[in-house]
Every structure is written in structure tokens, then in C-alpha cells.
Amino acid sequence: MNRENKDSAAEFLQQFPIFQDLSPEELKQVEDIAISRSIHKKTVIFSEGSEKEAVFFIRTGIVKAYKTDENGHEQIVSFLKTGDMFPHTGFFNAHPYPATAEAITPTELLAIPVRQFERLMLSTPAIAIKIMRVLGDKIRELQDKLQVLSGQDVRNRVLSFLLMLAEQHGQTNGDQIIINLPMTHQEFANSIGTTRETANRLLNQLTKEHLLEVDRSRIIILDLYALKQQRDM
């Protein structure tokens, strides 16, 4: 990288909780092994089961992570946006990638090679300790979300997923929350573990109740309070 790219990479990495506790000297060591990558829309970044070579940090764009069952059906694990890293535990085990990651918009990434990062942690244990603390908190957060979703009926899973999308991807426009996420109805259904027909029926019902507007590139939440009330009933 040239000096300008290095400066912007350092500032970008400093925004991540995983690196926030690092000293300037420690951060520079991480920065020196980071690689910039530009990914086209609908490009697979890595495939489930392939050798884990790097951990990625999203500068711009949206990435979906999904697993595939024995029948070839997608089960979406998450939608990742600017400021997210994936996979979360990538630095700390030798297992293959746990899911497939695919860019659903043009995406700019920073990649940190796992083996180079492991060598860095061995030479600077303080970096490893600080990062492991942060990742432990993230894993507990993801486990809590999974427990909430798995314990609900399908309608409540739809409501909870919409509220999670609003929190993570929503932009406020007056009283509306606009979620600019080019997600198909099948991808929406895969995210909550149901069929496309069931997801369509529930989204249409919420639309008729004047809680949502839905098209192929975005979801508009018309009444966030009412949506929360529906979920909490």
C-alpha cells in the first residue's frame, strides 16, 4: 500500500472494537499486513468448507453469509455491512470457513491473512489478549440473538428479523425507517428459517396493516413502534 492507503487503513481498522484497545504501535503492525480488495456484486469471497486464509473487514458494501444443507438449500446466517468483520472467530482456529460469503453489492474489503496475523500475535501477546476479549463478547451476543430467534414462532421471527435489520441497516427518514438491502424474498425466508411462501404471506400481511412497504431493493418500516408492539404481544 502507498502511504495514503496506509493512513486510511489505520483509521478504518481503529473503528473496529477488536482493534480499539491496541496502541498506535500495535495497530501499525496490523495495518502493515492488511490487503485491500475490491469485490464485484454477486462474487463469492470464500466458500463454506474451504481453507481459511484471511479475515475480512468491510469498508463499503453488503455481504451475505450463508450455509448450504444437503439438499442445496441456503440458510442465511447474516447480512454484513460497512464496519463489520467476518468470520468472527477466524483468527483463532484452524477450521475451514463455516459459511459461504457473497457480495450482494460492489464491496471494498480489507483482508488480514490468518497466518501472518497468527505470527504477529505470537510475537506480540498483548494484541492476542485484547482481541480475544472482544471476540468473546461478540460470540455471546450472536448466541443470544440465535436463542431469541429459535424460540419464536414464524411471525415473531419475521418481526424480530425486521427490527434487527432496522437497527443494523436502517436509515431514518422522518417517521420512516428505510432499509436499503437488495434482498430477495427467498433470502429473507432463508434468514428466518421458513419457506418463501410463508415469508411472502407474512410480509404481505404487514404491508396490508400499513406497517411496511417492500420492494426488491429495500424495506420501509412505516411504524417502528407498532412493529415492536406486534413483536412483544
Image (spheres, grey):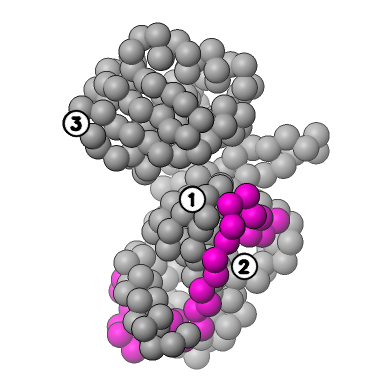
Relative to 218, say whether 25 is above or below: below
Q: Earlier in the sequence, mark 3 or mark 1?
A: 1
Residue at which label 1 appears = 62
Q: Which mark is residue 50?
A: none
The image shows residue 73, relative to residue 99, as above or below, that is above
Q: Residue furthest left?
A: 174
Residue 76 in percent (x, y) is at 59, 40
Side of 222 where 203 appears, left or right = right
Instruction: Report which residue position mark 2 lands on.
Output: 93
- In reply to whether residue 33 is colored magenta, the answer given is yes
Q: Residues within 10 Å of mark 2 (few under 14, many from 20)?
A: few
As drawn, 48 above or below 126:
above
Tell me what residue is drawn at x 35 percent, y 70 percent: 12
SS state under label 2: loop
Compute the Cα span from label 3 to label 2. Answer: 45 Å
Task: Give, as a single range, the part of the protein colored magenta.
Answer: 20-47
Marked residue nearer the N-terminal end (1 or 2)? 1
Queried whether the magenta region covers residue 63, the answer comes back as no
Measuring from the top left, give residue 100's x and y in whole percent: 66, 52
The mark that comes first in sequence, 3 or 2, is 2
Q: Which residue is mark 3?
A: 174
